[in-house]
């Protein structure tokens, strides 16, 4: 089998350093896997990991991570700015270096069945989706953990694997196979998130804004700031520079000042071409996907 599999899970924990370290170690200690990225944000109360390797090794690392997360997180005690459906909220897989997408899909579903066998319901999204309405992540996560039980009463939202009710502490897991995306945040010098939310509504594709952009406006209470948090799901259609210019324009129109940017997780080199240097200040060279060697 040629090619590698990339996994970029989002975990509902960004404040407890011991938990964050344990989750990272569960991945990093797996033979044949390279942990490329781990970041945690206390306002989002969420961490993002990225790891790569041969498909079997990546699935093993994902199982180890899931076991740790299910054991340590109780969503009934969790609160944060970022929406979430589960303790292990989203587990996206990306086929790299010529890996057949069908192989990635099979491994994704094997992981989903494994999670379901442990009593946690699973929804497949993006290329793994079993219904068109489940393809987009925001549609699957709509309502979050707090409304999951009532939503699952509707047969249209029965899970793809696992029990037909939420796990009491872990909620549900969303997993699928998607292409490379760029997580790009722009921070504003105001603690009031109203402006960030208005800008997010203005620019997101679902509201008729910029193509291939998903956006949320969030409060960053610990920093005294607010944030336009974006997923650029097709950076060739909408670049970082275009997204940044749109947020800056929305901020100026509202009398707000942009005070920083963040790129979370690995980013393909092509996504950085032509991007102004001030946007790239926070990017670590290790985040560039092509810069990292094979495990």
Image (cartoon, rainbow, N blue to C red):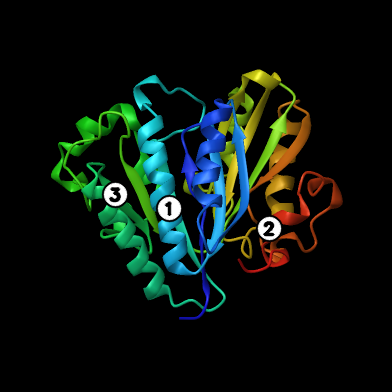
Select label 1 or label 2 by which is in front.
1
Please indicate whether residue 192 sits to the left or right of residue 124 in the image. Answer: right
Judge the density around disc 3: few (<14), some (14-19), many (≥20) Cα neighbours within 10 Å. many
* Whether residue 196 is visible: yes
Judge the density around disc 1: few (<14), some (14-19), many (≥20) Cα neighbours within 10 Å. many
Coordinates of residue 253 in the picture (x, y in percent): 73, 32
**Is 152 situated above or below 236?**
above
Residue that carries the numbered disc 3 in the rendered image = 115
Please identify the quadrant where the N terminus is shown.
bottom left
Please identify the quadrant where the C terminus is shown.
bottom right
Select label 3 or label 2 by which is in front.
3
Describe the element under mark 3 as helix, strand or loop.
helix
- Measured in 3D between alpha carbons, the distance from the residue under mark 3 to the one under mark 2, in whole angstroms, is 35 Å
Coordinates of residue 43 in the picture (x, y in percent): 58, 25
Residue that carries the numbered disc 2 in the rendered image = 239
Task: Tell me where residue 229 sits by quadrant.
Answer: top right
Mark sitting on residue 62: 1
- Measured in 3D between alpha carbons, the distance from the residue under mark 1 to the one under mark 3, in whole angstroms, is 10 Å
* Whether residue 191 is visible: no
């Amino acid at each position: 089998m040629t090619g590698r599999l990339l996994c970029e899970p989002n975990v509902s924990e960004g404040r407890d350093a011991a938990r964050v370290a344990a989750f990272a170690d569960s991945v990093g200690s797996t033979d044949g896997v390279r942990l490329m990225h781990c970041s945690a944000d206390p306002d989002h109360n969420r961490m993002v990991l990225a790891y790569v390797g041969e498909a079997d090794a990546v699935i093993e690392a994902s199982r180890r991570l899931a076991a740790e997360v299910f054991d340590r997180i109780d969503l009934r005690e969790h609160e944060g700015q970022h929406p979430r459906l589960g303790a292990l909220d989203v587990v996206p897989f990306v086929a790299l270096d010529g890996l057949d997408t069908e192989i990635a899909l099979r491994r994704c579903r094997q992981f989903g069945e494994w999670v379901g066998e442990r009593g946690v319901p699973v929804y497949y999204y993006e290329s793994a989706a079993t219904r068109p309405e489940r393809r987009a992540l925001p549609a699957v996560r709509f309502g979050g953990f707090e409304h999951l039980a009532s939503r699952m009463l509707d047969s249209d939202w029965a899970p793809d694997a696992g029990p037909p009710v939420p796990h009491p502490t872990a909620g549900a897991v969303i997993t699928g196979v998607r292409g490379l995306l760029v997580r790009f945040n722009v921070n504003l010098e105001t603690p009031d998130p109203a402006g960030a939310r208005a800008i997010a509504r203005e620019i997101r594709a679902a509201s008729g804004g910029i193509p291939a952009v998903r956006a949320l406006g969030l409060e960053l209470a610990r920093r005294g700031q607010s944030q336009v948090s974006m997923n650029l799901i097709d950076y060739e259609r909408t670049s970082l520079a275009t997204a940044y210019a749109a947020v800056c324009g929305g901020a100026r129109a509202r009398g707000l000042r942009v005070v920083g940017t963040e790129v979370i997780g690995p980013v393909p080199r092509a996504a950085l071409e032509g991007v102004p240097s001030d946007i790239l200040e926070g990017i670590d060279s290790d985040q560039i996907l092509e810069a990292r060697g094979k495990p």
